[in-house]
Amino acid sequence: MNLANMSVSADALVGAAEEIVSRMRTGGPLAMRMAKKLVNAASPAWLGDVSIAEPELIERLYAAGEPVEGVAAFLEKRVPRWEMEEQG
């Protein structure tokens, strides 16, 4: 599983990680949870689960409206207003 898309020196590692986390925090909360589930499902031990999990997670994401808000915010040049899903 190849998730690396950049390399940095040891001296720059903490700063680079903080920058990535900062960008991730601007994403929709539901989308971030779904992405984590897909990464976990794609691990070698569970690789077969991706084809089962992905359609369900994408359907849930679109039903929650996050993609619509993300596109609208982009087009209107504003920060997205994410609605937090109630945790049960």
Image (spheres, rainbow, N blue to C red):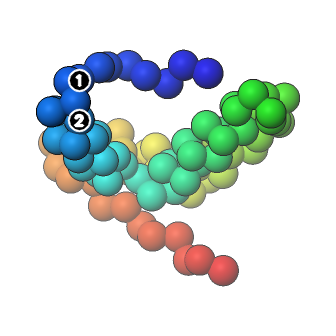
Q: Is residue 3 visible?
A: yes
Left or right of 39 in this view: 83: left
**Residue indicated by mark 2:** 13
**Residue indicated by mark 1:** 8
Left or right of 7 in this view: 87: right
Residue occupying the far front of the picture: 10
Q: Residue visible at 54% across and 19% down?
A: 2
Left or right of 31 in this view: 27: left
Q: Distance from label 1 to label 2 (Cα)?
A: 6 Å
Tag 2: Cα neighbours inside 10 Å, few (<14), some, or many (≥20)?
few
Q: Residue visible at 56% across and 77% down?
A: 86
> Between disc 1 and disc 2, whose residue precedes?
1
User: Label 2 near label 1: C-beta < 8 Å?
Assistant: yes
Secondary element at image label 2: helix
Measured along the vertical axis of the image, is residue 28 above or below residue 81? Answer: above
Q: Quadrant of residue 11?
A: top left
Q: Residue visible at 57% across and 46% down?
A: 36
Q: Residue 33: where, in percent of width, then height?
A: 55, 53
Residue occupying the far bottom of the picture: 88
Mark 2: which amino acid? Leu
Q: How many marks?
A: 2
Tell me, for residue 56, which label it has, or none. none
Q: Quadrant of the N terminus?
A: top right
Measured along the vertical axis of the image, is residue 46 above or below residue 64? Answer: above
Q: Residue 10: where, in percent of width, then height?
A: 22, 30
Please tell me which residue lies in front, 39 or 75: 39
Q: Residue 45: where, in percent of width, then height?
A: 80, 33
Mark 1: which amino acid? Val
Secondary element at image label 1: loop
Q: Quadrant of the C terminus?
A: bottom right
Tag 1: Cα neighbours inside 10 Å, few (<14), some, or many (≥20)?
few
